[in-house]
Image (spheres, rainbow, N blue to C red):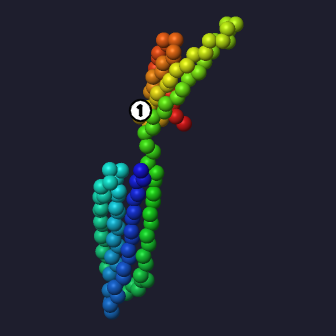
Amino acid sequence: MTLTNTAITDTKTQIDDTTATKTHTVTVTLKKPDGTTSTTQTTDTTSRSNIIENQDETTKTVTQAQKKSTMNVSILAANDFTKPTIIPRYGVSVTKELIGPLTFGVFGVNNGVVGISLGLNF
């Protein structure tokens, strides 16, 4: 999912014999991850005497990728190499991001060992 902020700045100048009027409008449209949009518009008008300005229009778009919370499922395999026989152990691990880079998980192995894990993504 992507969060997009779009700001459009529009500058217009009206000139008569003695006064120039400058109107500055900023429109910000925010598209939220749930699909709704929110629009805010701000207008600033100033008048100046004997000033001639060019018409200027600027459009700027800033896009930020929003990181999704992920779940990780892992298959585990192990062996005790301090013993002369090979007795493989198999298991599964499931981890989920909690807050920011902090993860929490559970695991189990076929010899009856179960546990929890805490981690940090970086």
Q: Is residue 79 left or right of residue 49?
A: right
Residue name at image x 61 percent, y 15 percent: 88
Q: Name the residue that disc number 1 marks.
A: 98
**Residue 28, image x, y percentages:** 35, 63
Q: Nearer the viewer, residue 4 or 74?
A: 74
The quadrant in which the C terminus is found is top right
Q: Nearer the viewer, residue 71 or 23?
A: 71
Residue kind at label 1, given as amino acid type? Leu
**Residue 36, image x, y percentages:** 30, 55
Can residue 48 be seen at all in this image of the molecule?
no
Q: Nearer the viewer, residue 106 or 50?
A: 106
The image quarter in which residue 11 lies: bottom left
Residue name at image x 37 percent, y 87 percent: 50
Q: Residue furthest bottom?
A: 17
Label 1: which secondary element: strand
- Relative to 32, residue 76 above or below: above
- Relative to 113, residue 121 above or below: below
**Residue 6, image x, y percentages:** 39, 63
